[in-house]
Amino acid sequence: MVQYQLVNRGIQDERVLKVMADVARHMFVPQLYRHAAYDDCPLPIGEGQTISQPYMVAIMTQCLELKGKETVLEIGTGSGYQAAILSRLASRVYTIERHETLASRAKTILKQTGYDNIEVIVGDGSLGLPDKSPFHGIIVTACAPRVPVCLLDQLKTGGRLIIPIGNPYNQVLHRMVKLEKGVEDRDILECAFVPLIGEEGWKPG
């Protein structure tokens, strides 16, 4: 997986590559799909959600440029896999999931597999987590119709927001860096994510 899906497609951060090799992805995949846990594709995890393909996890993580001492917020816990990756690259990870069943399952798996610097929270991820801010990085694993301003507000100066923006059919992954004045915004690649449901995302329905 690491060589063919990541290195060959431009993932260069050695810390990211090592963690992607070390974290047991199959532990976060439902039993029915474990035979495909390391394939180059997203997989269903229930509640209409998916675990992202390994390459997407790697490139989003690489864009955060983590050094090891950061506090990171993830929006969309899902299976818990992305949080596990982040936990080995940052000091503290907060992750928000709106589906209580997924949050509970992820929390159990993360505890069983020894990831002890992650806090899983049930709530509206589109609003972020203001009481724990500011963050060095925020990663959103669902597509928003626009950038939630509250997430930019919860970043430290120099912090990075990695977020897919668009509609259910056309989405672009953005890397945004909060500056002293304004935001530096760079398109990374086209992508396909489930919608970010919430007050600052898509409305449920």
Image: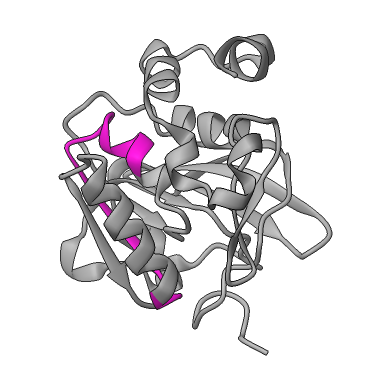
**Nearer to us in this view, 131 or 16:** 16
Rendered view: 54 above or below 168: above
Residue 99 image point, x, y percent: 45, 75
Name the residue rendered at 33%, 68% in the picture. Answer: 104
Looking at the image, can residue 109 be seen? yes
Answer with left or right where residue 121 lies relative to residue 183.
left
**Nearer to us in this view, 35 or 154:** 35
Answer with left or right where residue 124 lies relative to residue 199.
left
The answer to which image quadrant residue 44 occupies is bottom right
Residue 45 image point, x, y percent: 57, 58
Quadrant showing the C terminus: bottom right
Q: Is residue 49 magenta?
A: no
Q: How many marks?
A: 0
Rendered view: 131 above or below 164: below
**Nearer to us in this view, 118 or 153:** 118
Residue 87 image point, x, y percent: 27, 38
Rendered view: 192 above or below 55: below
The answer to which image quadrant residue 13 occupies is top left
The image's colouring method is one colour
Quadrant showing the N terminus: top right
Q: Which residue lies furthest to the bottom in this view?
A: 205
For the record, the magenta segment spans 84-100
Residue 88 image point, x, y percent: 27, 30
Name the residue rendered at 76%, 65% in the picture. Answer: 167
Q: Which residue lies furthest to the right in this view?
A: 169
**Nearer to us in this view, 43 or 202:** 43
Q: Does the magenta stretch include residue 89?
A: yes
Looking at the image, can residue 187 be seen? no
Name the residue rendered at 16%, 31% in the picture. Answer: 69
Name the residue rendered at 22%, 41% in the picture. Answer: 115
The answer to which image quadrant residue 8 occupies is top right
